[in-house]
Amino acid sequence: MSSVSVKQIFWVSLATALISLLALAAIDMHLRTPVSPAGIVSFEVCAYSSSCADIVESWGPHARLMAALSLGIDYLFMAAYPAAICFGLLTVLPYVPHRIRNLTVVAAWSAWLAGVADAVENFCLARMLVLPSAQEFAWPASLSATVKFVFLGYTLGWLIVTYVCFVLLRPGVGKTS
């Protein structure tokens, strides 16, 4: 029996993340209204503008169903994108200079914190979607979304920087002898 490599996990999780992201983007078109111009993202951070109940009301029955579908697919996405980032960083780790390898490992495993924050956010959003009067979930949802975006930005940014600087631009790449 062969073992699964970090690189294989990276590619499978990346493909899963991209496919689910495309589905989420298609669904999100149904969630854009004057009250929620950024679609589901407007709902994720609705506590900052005190617009949570207004967003749910503006969606109507069809859009609320689409929002529920979005939250459901997001559970697949929230497992796939942290895996893609984590295993992507672990894949580039051999190319990273020793002095920043620990930072890269911390960034890799920090990607899972974005996924956990996303799960908390989704739970809160689902409660508000089903029961718009459940406004006590607005702040936990928006704060969880903020934590998610911070960790996502940090970890995805570090993946891009390490890949470009230490894999793409490393000496000898693309040169033939």
Image (cartoon, grey):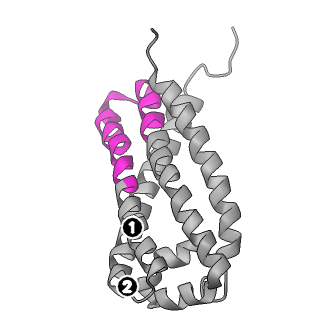
Choose between 158 and 54: the one closer to the eye: 54
Give percent across and percent down for residue 145: 41, 68
Residue type, mark 1 in image: Phe
Specify whether residue 21 is in view: yes
Residue type, mark 2 in image: Ala
Q: Looking at the image, is 124 positioned above or below residue 17? A: below
Secondary structure, magenta segment, majority class: helix
Residue under the point 45% across and 47% down: 79
Specify whether residue 38 is in view: no
Residue 40 picture quarter:
bottom right
Q: CA distance from mark 2 to mark 1?
A: 12 Å
Give percent across and percent down for residue 136: 32, 84
Choose between 21 and 151: the one closer to the eye: 21
Location of the N terminus by quadrant is top left
Name the element at disc 1. Answer: helix
What is the span of residues highlighted in magenta in the rendered image?
A: 86-115
Label ID, residue 134: 2
Label pair 2/1, CB-CB below 8 angstroms: no
Give percent across and percent down for residue 114: 39, 55
Residue 15 picture quarter:
top right
Choose between 40 and 87: the one closer to the eye: 40
Residue under the point 36% across and 39% down: 104
Mark 2 and mark 1 lie on one chain; the one further toward the N terminus is 1
Residue 172 picture quarter:
top right
Q: Is residue 68 left or right of residue 145?
A: right
Q: Looking at the image, is 51 positioned above or below residue 22? A: below
Residue 127 among those drawn in magenta: no
- Count the marks: how many? 2
Q: Which residue is mark 1?
A: 123
